[in-house]
Amino acid sequence: MELEDFMITAAAALLGFISLFKNLLVFIRWLHATFLRKPKNLCEYGSWAVVTGPIDGIGKALAFELVSKGLNLVLVGRNLNKLEPTTSELRWTYANEIQVKTVVADLAKLSGEEIEAVIGEATEGLDVGAVVNNGGLAYPYPRYFREVDRELMESMLRVNLNAVMWVTKGVIDGMSKKKREAILNIGSASSVYLSSYPLQTLYASTKTYIPLFLATKMTMLRRRTMPCRLSRCSVE
Ligand SMILES: NC(=O)c1ccc[n+]([C@@H]2O[C@H](COP(=O)([O-])OP(=O)(O)OC[C@H]3O[C@@H](n4cnc5c(N)ncnc54)[C@H](OP(=O)(O)O)[C@@H]3O)[C@@H](O)[C@H]2O)c1
């Protein structure tokens, strides 16, 4: 084999090794996070958590999970009639051992400052250690961008993107006085694994914002003091 051939083969082998090693590291990190890492005790962060969109699905499951760990909840939804059954179910399941406050706020209709004010007022004086930005909406069915109606476009931006920022702003001042805080933003695999997510392009775009805001992905909790420029400049 000539030297040139050898160099090309060696370079290709090195690139292959680097790529394999990178993927192996990702897999090991996933294994560690999923099966080995000790869960964080959110009660150490504060005795209350704020959850948006807790009526159904992921938000409701997270609300039950947080309460099972001993946290009191501030539930943020747009419809009191829909919030009440979840609140009653939580109280019934945990035999009134926990406190649940409900906040009615339509995250698609209120302005950012109104959201901040409503959340700030509802959490004033509470020892809030965690906020879960879960409320979100997607297209009811896949469609091309030009087919998405304006109201849905506006709501998606407001709920998936604006509200995440303003709800966080509403609680962050109270939380920042403590050493620990947990901000859990629910992103979507649509913005991570499927670039441009065909026929859900606006939804995927709004969810792309989530990993950048506070530099979190799906469920990563990050301390404000971590040396992460994105995390710092987003919060402060
Ligand atoms: N399901 C999935 O496969 C999936 C995958 C990845 C990420 N996610 C993300 O996970 C989160 C929860 O998803 P899900 O599937 O559990 O959805 P879901 O069952 O539809 O729940 C969404 C929640 O957001 C609330 N919400 C919607 N618009 C609102 C508004 N204008 N003001 C206040 N609250 C509003 C809904 O309240 P109403 O009942 O009043 O509408 C509901 O409680 C979303 O952020 C979603 O993007 C979901």
Image (cartoon, helix red, strand yellow):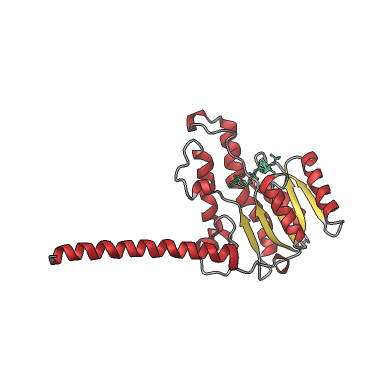
Q: In this view, does 6 lie above or below 203?
A: below
Quarter placement of the C terminus? bottom right
Residue 19 seen in render: yes
Q: Residue 41, image x and y in percent?
A: 69, 67
Quarter placement of the N terminus? bottom left
Is residue 39 toward the left or the right of residue 122 in the image?
Answer: left
Instruction: State the residue at coordinates (50%, 47%).
Output: 191
Is residue 129 toward the left or the right of residue 145 in the image?
Answer: right
Q: Residue 14, image x and y in percent?
A: 29, 65
Residue 17 occupies quadrant: bottom left
Is residue 15 toward the left or the right of residue 191 in the image?
Answer: left
For ligand 1, the image quadrant comes to top right
Of residues 170 and 144, the one drawn nearer to the viewer in this rendering: 144
Give the farthest residue toward the left: 2
Q: How many marks?
A: 0
Q: Residue 233, image x and y in percent?
A: 53, 61
Give the farthest residue toward the right: 95
Q: Residue 185, image x and y in percent?
A: 60, 54
Residue 223 seen in render: no
Q: In this view, does 234 lie above or below 196?
A: below
Give the farthest residue toward the front: 1
Of residues 85 and 228, the one drawn nearer to the viewer in this rendering: 85
Residue 31 occupies quadrant: bottom right
Of residues 149 and 193, the one drawn nearer to the viewer in this rendering: 193
Instruction: State the residue at coordinates (71%, 69%).
Output: 44
Instruction: State the residue at coordinates (41%, 63%).
Output: 22
